[in-house]
């Protein structure tokens, strides 16, 4: 199995590990355990191979993964049977990064190889998400810790773009050849 990403739960008690046909949570207290396989009762699909995983700080039992098929998946670690809560489609290529806000309402950014960043409202099941066009394949996205309406996207071509969620037309700023 290939591990692509891991994330520690907001309370620090568990770690989620995601990768190719892999999504498990492990307790960080006590003796070594086998962990909980979140894919155990879920029908296998290519969308379950994940590039990234992130916990929801407002919902400590839930996490999201960004799949190689372009879907964003919401999981609940406390559900019986299939732990897959929702599949959010929108990206045309692999999702490289998923990151959640710590404020209410819970929002999620997903960055993809399809040269877009999408903003999802996790409280609204069928809400249309906002799409932000990037100047290249998106490798990473992060919300601004000081301005909750802004985020940065790191691109495959070495540039960084800064966006404001109130306007999904153009980036506010672009830095070329950041590295």
Image (spheres, rainbow, N blue to C red):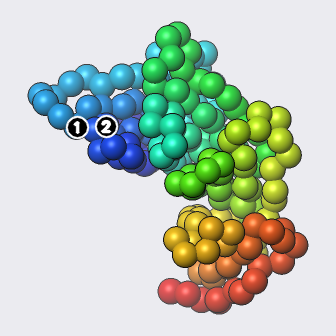
Quadrant housing residue 43:
top right
Residue 27 in sight in this render: yes
Q: Are marks 2 and 1 in contact (CB under 8 Å)?
A: yes
The one of 87 and 80 positioned closer to us in this rendering: 80
Quadrant housing residue 49:
top right
First in sequence, mark 2 or 1: give its number: 2
Q: Horizontal and vertical percent for residue 51?
A: 53, 47
Query: As drawn, is 33 to the left or to the right of 101?
Result: left
The one of 15 and 137 positioned closer to us in this rendering: 15
Q: Tell me what residue is drawn at x 13 percent, y 30 percent.
A: 30
Eyeballing the image, is 151 above or below 87? below
Query: As drawn, is 22 to the left or to the right of 66?
Result: left
Q: Tell me what residue is drawn at x 70 percent, y 39 percent.
A: 123
Q: Tell me what residue is drawn at x 38 percent, y 43 percent.
A: 9
The Cα–Cα distance between marks 2 and 1, rounded to whole angstroms, is 5 Å
Name of the residue lying farthest toward the left: 31
> What residue does disc 1 label?
28
The one of 174 and 10 positioned closer to us in this rendering: 10
The numbered disc on residue 128 is none
Query: As drawn, is 84 to the left or to the right of 169?
Result: left
Q: Horizontal and vertical percent for residue 8?
A: 35, 46
> What residue does disc 2 label?
14
Q: Tell me what residue is drawn at x 48 percent, y 46 percent.
A: 57
């Amino acid at each position: 199995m290939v591990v692509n990403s891991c994330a520690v739960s907001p309370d620090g008690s568990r770690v989620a590990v995601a990768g190719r046909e892999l999504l498990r949570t492990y307790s960080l207290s006590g003796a070594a355990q086998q962990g909980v396989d979140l894919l155990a009762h879920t029908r296998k699909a290519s969308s379950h191979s994940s590039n990234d995983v992130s916990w929801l700080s407002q919902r400590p039992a839930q996490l999201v993964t960004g799949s190689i098929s372009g879907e964003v998946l919401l999981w609940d670690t406390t559900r019986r049977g299939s732990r897959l809560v929702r599949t959010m489609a929108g990206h045309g290529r692999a999702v490289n990064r998923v990151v959640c806000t710590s404020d209410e309402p819970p929002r999620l950014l997903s960055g993809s190889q399809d040269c877009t960043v999408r903003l999802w409202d996790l409280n609204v099941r069928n809400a249309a998400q906002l799409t932000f066009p990037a100047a290249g394949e998106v490798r990473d996205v992060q919300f601004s810790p000081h301005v909750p309406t802004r985020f940065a996207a790191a691109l495959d071509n070495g540039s960084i773009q800064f966006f404001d969620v109130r306007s999904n037309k153009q980036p506010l700023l672009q830095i070329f050849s950041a590295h």
